[in-house]
């Protein structure tokens, strides 16, 4: 289990991550979503024990991750920027990880390589970005870690390889009870892989929920009122994207708690008809990020 | 799940194994280079059997000192590359997220590097011992020397490694860590050597320059570098005896306890720095990988060193007004500091923050500048207590004709003789009085005078003053009023004083390489060697006014008369006042040329021309009595007079040879826009004679010809050098005092 508890990380005066908390259970894949520069990589590096958080902590199976080599023997971090020893072959790097990870399974590694159709004698420098990613994923899975931190791991992979990787991660997780955090700015990559999603917005966690709960806990409302109501009625409600057109009112509600509050208020309104539509992950993402949206029509105008 | 330690140990062991592979290169290279150098000194076909043993040949002194730098450099490279992974984002992502603690990463790199560094330091000496066992002999001295040098090189390599490791785990950027390490390692050398330069420029009186004042005799007046060499981890072998060889004849050099202590101290410093590395590694923020200027302390330290170096360089160019010089010494280092830090941070906010550091640099430089330019608050201008002085010596502003035949040595800026040792109380007081006059007029002239005192407690005090006033320069010539000078004339012109010789015989023979040797070798020891040659006057040549013709006196007079002449001449020479000697009122009637000692012994002049003036009545009478007179060249023989320089600021002239060669030694440098260059006889001085005006007027020619001085020394006189060109094409250079122009 990975527990991220109120983690704040600053670089000088700049706050990269501000009080983020979430938990990744065993046999769980946690998707970390956010715009570029949201703090996903910082959070992963903090979780990997590389960065010391300014406040809060990251616990791996109850033990502090920072500079804890014993716990990290079961952790594999695939960074956004991959590193391979100069002039090394796939086999050479595998030997490196085999030396560093006692649990490294060379046979498993070779099997994964064959799935990816990678030549173990090939020099890594001759690989494309996607092929290097595949090799990294092979090293990670063959190391049989208990915790996997994957930063933009699908970046550069073709759709077929993405699907293979997802299947491998799911299979491995099921077999090993591994806790995985996978970061991405692409929703589609995570939608059918993760069981939990965390959305980082403005350096803070704005959403942390199970994928299954997203349609239940996040709704779009379409209200048709029998008589007009003032806009002020909705002002104190935890709603987003409010739009009032005559007697028709549109808004979205994110989160189970917010939903309860809204339902109580809405019940008091003169409703002619009401639609409560479950939101998709993408809609939730866009709704959460509305503060950062730009009016692109104004850019050149 | 339980995480056993074995997984962490497994990773740690593998990392250590990898380290043993990756850190091998630079120690191997150092060892290889050393072995190459070693083999190059072992030509077994022409092996000098005079050696009992050798590691380094006796003539490879500098090479084995340079190896301190080489080993430190390879140690530093080992450190830089061992911890390079920390300065790369990609590499630190991997290393710092795996199952090895930061401490273990450091430990593995230190263990593996230290192992190879030990081998790199030992192997060449094992090879040397094997070579000695085959071709020469193996004895305790060889083993001792091998252990000593192996320790030295290991210490230097470890220090280089420790410094580079310290900076690499402290800063973010690889190049930055290289620059910081290089700066830290070379800072002692740069600061020590440049400080000598700075002291000689800013501290008027300190005889501590960037090179030895009396270099040829082992450093009587030691340089700042020689005092502080042991503070330099890469140069302390320079202050220890060369024990790397032994001849069949004579003992090998021995090391003192202090020599061993120096090695141990620097080794401990290296270990101490290495102990800091794991702690810094634990504190290191992984996010600084690759970033420039992430560690402000490292940046400030490095930039401060460059600011200090700029201060020391600026101090050498301060020929302008004193206050402008002081301002430059403060402002330029501060600008260097703010300039480099601005380049590193490239951030307005940081620039403003660094103004505080710049103010600190300016304050430190102000303290340095004020301390040094006041002669360390008067320390270097204070005259010693006469009661505590054993003997004194002086290098006067002008030395021509003073006839001191003590050791000829090289001083900082010019050829100067040390006059002394003067042990008589009155003489010491005379020197102290000159010293005070010189100090009182500092900064008001362009001359140099130096003083040397040996104190009763065995210490030496040496002072070298620049910018000595005219009064100070003239006062320094009062050395001729000392009993020591009288004795010198007496010794030179009468029979050899065997008591004096016996006094010098008392100097014990000492073992080279010992402190005692250092102290006695320097200074007056050379006198002993010189006097021991038992020079005497030899022949006396008498020349006329122009040195055109001469007679050998012994061919004209009997040996008894020769003795009489010597006595008479010495007495009259002895009676001359400094003014009569250095700025004579009249033209010389004769010139006595004496041969001193062996030909060109110790670089000193073997011939000396001494003018004889009308006031030296007995000498003139002797020569007249023996019909020694010359049909000297007359003014009619001169076709033109070339006025060489109208206003010399510093000049002394001593006519040294026949007119046909027209060589005169001019110790002045002339700066004129239009000149005709003409090399002097002493080409190593590289002087040129400058022609200001050519005079063909017969009356002026006659006037000048009848009034020139063949010898005229410093007086502040605004006279002129003249070159008389004779009908036969030969020429003669002399001096016309201001009042005669």
Image (cartoon, rainbow, N blue to C red):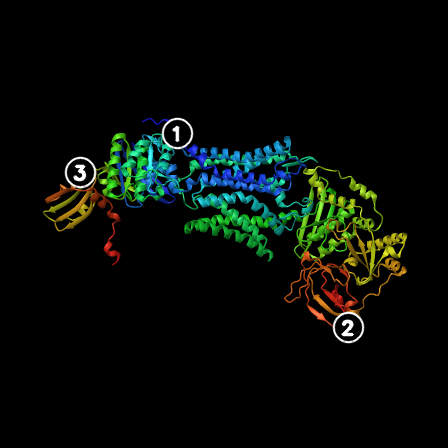
Where the C terminus of chain B falls, by quadrant? bottom right
The residue singled out by tag 2 in the image is B699
- Check the residue under mark 1 and report the chain it is in: B
- Taking depth in this image into account, of B312 and B23 the one nearest to the observer is B23
Asked if marks 3 and 2 touch (Cβ < 8 Å), the reply is no
Disc 3/disc 2 C-alpha distance (Å): 127 Å
Viewer-nearest of labels 1 and 3?
1
Secondary structure of the residue carrying numbered label 2: helix
Image disc number at residue B10: 1
Answer few, some or many: residues within 10 Å of disc 2's Cα (few below 14, many 20 plus, some between 14 and 19): few
The residue singled out by tag 3 in the image is A216
Q: Are marks 3 and 2 on the same chain?
A: no
Secondary structure of the residue carrying numbered label 3: helix
Residue A29 versus residue B348 in the image, above or below: above
Residue B37 versus residue B666 in the image, above or below: above
- Check the residue under mark 3 and report the chain it is in: A
- Residue A123 appears at what percent x and percent y? 36, 41
Q: Are marks 1 and 3 on the same chain?
A: no
Where the N terminus of chain B falls, by quadrant? top left
Nearest to N terminus: mark 1 or mark 2: 1
Disc 1/disc 2 C-alpha distance (Å): 106 Å
Asked if marks 1 and 3 touch (Cβ < 8 Å), the reply is no
Residue A129 versus residue B129 in the image, above or below: below
- Check the residue under mark 2 and report the chain it is in: B
Secondary structure of the residue carrying numbered label 1: helix
Residue B312 versus residue A2 in the image, above or below: below
- Residue B105 appears at what percent x and percent y? 43, 34
Disc 1/disc 3 C-alpha distance (Å): 48 Å
């Amino acid at each position: 289990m990975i527990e991220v508890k109120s983690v704040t990380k600053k670089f000088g005066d700049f706050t990269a991550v501000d009080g983020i908390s979430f938990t990744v259970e065993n046999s769980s894949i946690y998707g970390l979503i956010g715009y570029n520069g949201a703090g996903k990589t910082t959070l992963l590096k903090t979780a990997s024990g590389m960065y010391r958080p300014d406040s809060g902590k990251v616990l791996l199976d109850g033990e502090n991750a920072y500079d804890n080599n014993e716990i990290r023997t079961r952790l594999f971090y695939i960074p956004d920027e991959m590193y391979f020893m100069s002039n090394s072959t796939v086999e050479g790097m595998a030997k490196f990880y085999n030396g560093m990870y006692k649990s490294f399974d060379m046979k498993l590694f070779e099997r994964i390589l064959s799935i990816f159709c990678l030549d173990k004698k090939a020099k890594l420098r001759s690989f494309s970005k996607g092929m290097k990613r595949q090799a990294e994923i092979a090293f990670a899975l063959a190391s049989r870690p208990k915790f996997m931190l994957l930063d933009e791991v699908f970046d550069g992979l073709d759709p077929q390889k993405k699907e293979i990787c997802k299947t491998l991660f799911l299979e491995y997780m099921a077999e090993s009870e591994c806790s995985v955090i996978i970061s991405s700015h692409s929703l589609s990559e995570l939608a059918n892989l993760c069981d939990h999603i965390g959305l980082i917005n403005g350096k803070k966690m704005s959403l942390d929920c199970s994928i299954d709960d997203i349609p239940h806990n996040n709704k779009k409302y379409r209200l048709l009122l029998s008589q007009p109501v003032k806009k002020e009625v909705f002002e104190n409600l935890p709603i987003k994207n409010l739009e009032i057109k005559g007697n028709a009112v549109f808004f979205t509600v994110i989160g189970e708690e917010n939903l309860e509050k809204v339902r109580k208020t809405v019940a008091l309104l003169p409703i002619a008809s009401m639609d409560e539509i479950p939101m998709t992950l993408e809609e939730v993402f866009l709704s959460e990020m509305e503060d950062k949206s730009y009016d692109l029509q104004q850019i050149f105008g | 799940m339980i995480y056993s330690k074995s997984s962490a140990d497994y990773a740690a062991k593998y990392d250590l194994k990898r380290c043993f592979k990756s850190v091998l290169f630079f120690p191997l290279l150092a060892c290889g280079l050393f072995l190459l150098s070693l083999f190059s000194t072992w030509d077994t076909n022409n092996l000098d059997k005079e050696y009992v043993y050798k590691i380094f040949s006796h003539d490879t002194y500098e090479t084995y000192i340079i190896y301190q730098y080489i080993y430190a450099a390879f140690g530093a490279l080992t450190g830089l590359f061992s911890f390079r992974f920390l300065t790369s984002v990609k590499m630190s992502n991997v290393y710092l997220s795996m199952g090895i603690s930061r401490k273990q990463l450091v430990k593995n790199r230190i263990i593996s590097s230290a192992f190879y560094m030990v081998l790199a330091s030992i192997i060449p000496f094992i090879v040397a011992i094997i070579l000695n066992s085959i071709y020469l002999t193996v004895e305790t001295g060889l083993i001792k020397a091998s252990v000593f040098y192996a320790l030295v090189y290991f210490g230097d390599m470890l220090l280089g490694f420790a410094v580079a490791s310290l900076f690499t785990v402290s800063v973010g950027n690889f190049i930055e860590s290289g620059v910081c390490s290089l700066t830290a390692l070379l800072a002692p050398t740069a600061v020590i050597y440049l400080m000598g330069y700075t002291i000689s420029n800013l501290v008027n009186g300190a005889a501590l320059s960037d090179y030895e004042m009396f270099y040829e005799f082992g450093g009587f007046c030691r340089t700042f570098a020689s005092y502080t060499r042991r503070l330099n981890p890469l140069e302390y072998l320079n202050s220890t005896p060369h024990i790397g060889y032994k001849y069949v004849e004579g003992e090998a050099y021995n090391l003192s306890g202090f020599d061993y202590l120096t090695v141990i101290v620097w080794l401990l410093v290296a270990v101490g720095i290495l102990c800091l590395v794991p702690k810094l590694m634990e504190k290191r923020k992984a996010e600084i990988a690759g970033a420039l200027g992430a560690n402000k302390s490292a940046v400030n330290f490095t930039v401060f060193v460059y600011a200090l170096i700029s201060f020391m360089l600026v101090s050498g160019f301060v020929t302008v007004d004193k206050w402008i010089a002081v301002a430059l010494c403060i402002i330029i280092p501060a600008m260097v500091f703010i300039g480099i830090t601005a380049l590193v941070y490239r951030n307005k906010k940081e620039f403003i923050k660094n103004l505080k550091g710049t103010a600190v640099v300016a304050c430190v430089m102000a303290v340095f500048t004020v301390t040094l330019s006041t002669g360390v608050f008067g320390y270097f201008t204070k005259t010693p207590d006469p009661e505590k002085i054993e003997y004194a010596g002086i290098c006067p502003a002008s030395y021509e004709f003073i006839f001191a035949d003590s050791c000829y040595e090289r001083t900082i800026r010019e050829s100067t003789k040390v006059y002394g040792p003067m042990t008589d109380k009155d003489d010491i007081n005379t020197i102290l009085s000159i010293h005070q006059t010189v100090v009182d007029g500092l900064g008001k002239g362009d001359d140099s005078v130096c003083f040397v005192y040996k104190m009763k407690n065995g210490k030496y005090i040496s002072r070298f003053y620049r910018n000595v006033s005219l009064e100070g320069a003239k006062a320094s010539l009062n050395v001729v009023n000392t009993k020591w000078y009288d004795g010198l004339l007496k010794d030179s012109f009468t029979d050899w004083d065997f008591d004096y010789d016996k006094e010098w015989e008392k100097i014990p023979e000492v073992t080279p390489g010992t402190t005692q040797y250092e102290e006695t070798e320097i200074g007056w020891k050379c006198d002993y060697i010189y006097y021991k040659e038992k020079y005497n006057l030899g022949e006396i040549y008498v020349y006329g006014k122009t040195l055109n013709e001469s007679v050998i006196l012994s061919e004209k007079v009997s040996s008894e008369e020769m003795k009489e002449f010597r006595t008479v001449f010495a007495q009259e020479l002895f009676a001359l006042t400094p003014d009569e000697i250095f700025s004579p009122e009249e033209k010389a009637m004769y010139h006595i040329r004496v041969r001193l000692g062996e030909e060109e012994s110790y670089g000193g002049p073997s011939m000396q021309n001494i003018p004889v003036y009308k006031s030296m009545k007995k000498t003139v009478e002797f020569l007249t009595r023996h019909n020694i007179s010359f049909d000297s060249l007359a003014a009619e023989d001169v076709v033109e007079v070339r006025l060489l320089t109208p206003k010399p600021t510093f000049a002394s002239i001593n006519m040294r040879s026949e007119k046909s060669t027209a060589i005169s030694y001019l110790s002045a440098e002339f700066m004129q826009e239009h000149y005709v260059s003409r090399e002097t006889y002493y080409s190593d001085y590289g002087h040129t004679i400058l022609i200001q005006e050519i005079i063909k007027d017969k009356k002026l020619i006659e006037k000048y010809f009848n009034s020139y001085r063949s010898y005229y020394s410093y007086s502040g006189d605004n006279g002129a050098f003249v070159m008389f060109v004779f009908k036969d094409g030969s020429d003669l250079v002399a001096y016309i005092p201001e009042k005669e122009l």
